Image (cartoon, grey):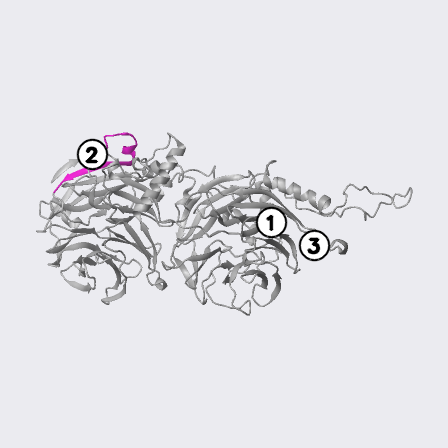
Amino acid sequence: MGSGGDRRSAGGGCSADVVCEKHLFKSKVSESLVQLAWSHPRCAFPLDRNELCIWNTETAQPLCLSGHHYSISAVSFGHKPSPLLVCSASRERVIVWNLDECTQKVQEGLTPRGTVVGTLLGMVLHVRFSLDDQQVAVCAGNRIYILSAKTEAILTELHGHLAPVTAAEFCTWEKTMLISVSEDRTFKVWDYSARQLIYQSAVLTTAFPLLSLLIDEENKQFITGSAEGTLWIFSLISDHNYRCVTHINLKKEQEKFCNKVWKSGKEIGEGQNTSKFCKTNNVRPEGSVETSLPVLFIEHCDFLVCFHNEENIYSALNTSYFWIGSSTGLLIINLRNFELEAFLSYKDYSDLSIRFARSCALTRKAVNGKVLCLITSMFEDVIAVFEVNLAALVRSQQSDFLLRGNKNSLSVIARCSLLTNSPLCKGLKKNMKEPASKTLGVKSTVKDQPLVFHNKIKSSGYTAAPRMTMFSPNNNLKKNEVSKWKTSCKRKTKEYPLESYPPIKYEKEISVTCKPTPICCIQYSGDGEMLACGLADKTVLILSSNLTDTYNVFSGHDGALNSVGWSHDKKWLVSASEDRTLRVWSVCNNEPALILGKEKFHETVRFAQFYFIDAFILLCCGAEFHLLSFHVDTTKDDLKRYKPRSVCKLVQKFPMASTMEITSLSAVNDFYSYIVLTAGRNRALEVFDLNAGCSTAVIPEVHTRSVHQICQNKGSSFSTQQPEAYNLFMTTAAGDGIKLWDLRTLKCERRFEGHHSCCYPCGIAVSPCGRFIASGSDDKCAYIYEMHSSSFSHKLGGHTESVINVAFSPSSPQHYISM
């Protein structure tokens, strides 16, 4: 054995802070993919092909074990620390070594011997100990052998794959379950004790074999990777039938990540330390060869070490991260949002001896913020041990948008008073002047006059304009005053329970019309007692929440309804239609109290809602949204009954950048908020601050398809509890799935997938407790997701057509509407 000894990165600077070469072994390396192993502080690998080397990183003393006559192709450590077992396999035998006994015999000057547990099984590509170290799963050819770890005995033989089995893993919570992947591009789930095949998948890829496998116990999922650089994630929840949660193209994720880091470095300037591979802006040099990203191994990543001294550790808590080892580098994948968090390319560091890896393995836990990586070279007979500083790697690439503090983060709750030039301030002033002077047409400056000469009895005021109390918010609330305001609000309904369960039981179904008519939009009132439905037959229905009574029917639109929205006091309803009109209705009156006609809008009004606790109306029309101030007057005057008494005026238009049409809009109306969220056909999401009257942030390419809905937790029950805690996130839906975003950092926190790949998530809703997300689908079902899981927890059937909209009841956790 030749050894290069300890090696430090000679280049100095930031490269030494990220990765350095700890040790280099000169050895004859196998020409095929070899399974390597780590059990900190020891690593195991073939030395000169048929000799097993156990190297202790703490003492730097190798332990060489001889017993194979052919090249070792697979190595694996046992799970128990004492005695620590290691299994090595070649085509002629499988040997289990007790490292404590082997070390003792070497100290005594004797030759250590292992226990042969299998012979002449064929070419072995993978071995794995069971959780109790009593059995060993050996993948040889297209078969899987379950061997005893103590004696030479084949306990079980599993066959069914059509090509060599490349990996197999024991399920940690199901004692008899084994999962295997193969070069035949399928996976199989086995009950190995009963020798039964539980599930067999379809072919996953077109031409590339599956190489690696890892079971994620926390999320009840397993991950497999292919030679083309694709990750497939499947659910292991019992009633999901091994449904595909998502698949990730590592090449595309790497390009997207490089663009993001490169743009971030450009904006920051010289102080930002970005990786070298990001500075090319994804333009390949002439004459270079595009490399693939085969998934050689998958391992858990101890990502929390990056945040042990950070204030915003919330972004990493309750999140699973994984190392992906490829021939060109190491990648870190966030399993909540399926995005790339960091990427280490071997060729970017000139001091590393290996540029392209044939095989690799990584320590699961980080020690002092560092992990060790064992790599065999693809073109040279060398084996290297790299030390990667995980925190330094993440900081070098994501210090701007991942590790920044909360100083510049957005706040959904209004934290400061209205600015003097704010559109909201201007709109409120106009709203206070118009009803007295222009709406009624009576002078408001008439002074009180005595009825009788020299009499001090004041006038009854019949000649004066009626006094009207207009909305005048106190925006100078401090934090302690805000909390007092929350507790002082009185509700007819009880507070929504925080610890609630989603509705999973079918209760009732009604038909809203005699003829088959699509329901375009639905919304609960804030107290959960009424439900508004906008229909394709141009009408609006007001129903009781238990679907037993119809309170009212509004007609007058000349097109299908696009949206309906309740006011904060539950007395008014705003509706928008395909006829390019907007109407405000009183719940107790069939006639519209306010109509904005076609002359006001050049395109269809896609969405409308009340805003700033009923002080304004927000609507989106084309590529811009409008802020309208309004006053609704329902008093009757027989002499002037044909003259409109309600007033609505445009305060300001806000165009969304680089889009032809706004597809969704979201804003909170249950407490004071300056933030308005918009999404357009350009797949971007834009954040507007209406206090400043400008756009504050743009997230490009939120989804791969146009966003058709943005949803925030707007449950009015939480206006009196903790709106800060329950309105920190927003949810977006598009044809490629559903994403949860943190409004403080504008970072995607989780991606929800679990519909069948051909199904389209149509409508989304967030439960008032903030724990569940509901989604309609074009497969005639609705899906319930829990915030901590990327796959759905419940599938609700019963519809005969696509479920295009869903809504949670704001008063009852077990009530849920889909249509």
Q: Kindly identify the amino acid type of the residue bearing the numbered disc 2.
A: Arg
Q: Kindly identify the amino acid type of the residue bearing the numbered disc 1.
A: Glu
Local crowd size for mark 1, using a 10 Å CA cut-off: few (<14), some (14–19), many (≥20): few
- Numbered badge on residue 144: none
Question: Residue 313's quadrant in the figure?
Answer: top left
Front residue of 196 and 431: 431
- Numbered badge on residue 634: 3
Return the x and y of residue 759 as percentages of the image width and height: 39, 59
Front residue of 142 and 289: 289
Q: Is residue 791 left or right of residue 37?
A: right
- Numbered badge on residue 599: 1
Mark 2 near mark 3, Cβ–Cβ under 8 Å? no
Mark 2 near mark 1, Cβ–Cβ under 8 Å? no
**Is any atom of residue 477 visible in this view?**
no
Q: CA distance from mark 2 to mark 1?
A: 76 Å
The residue indicated by pointer 2 is: 7
Return the x and y of residue 102 as percentages of the image width and height: 14, 48
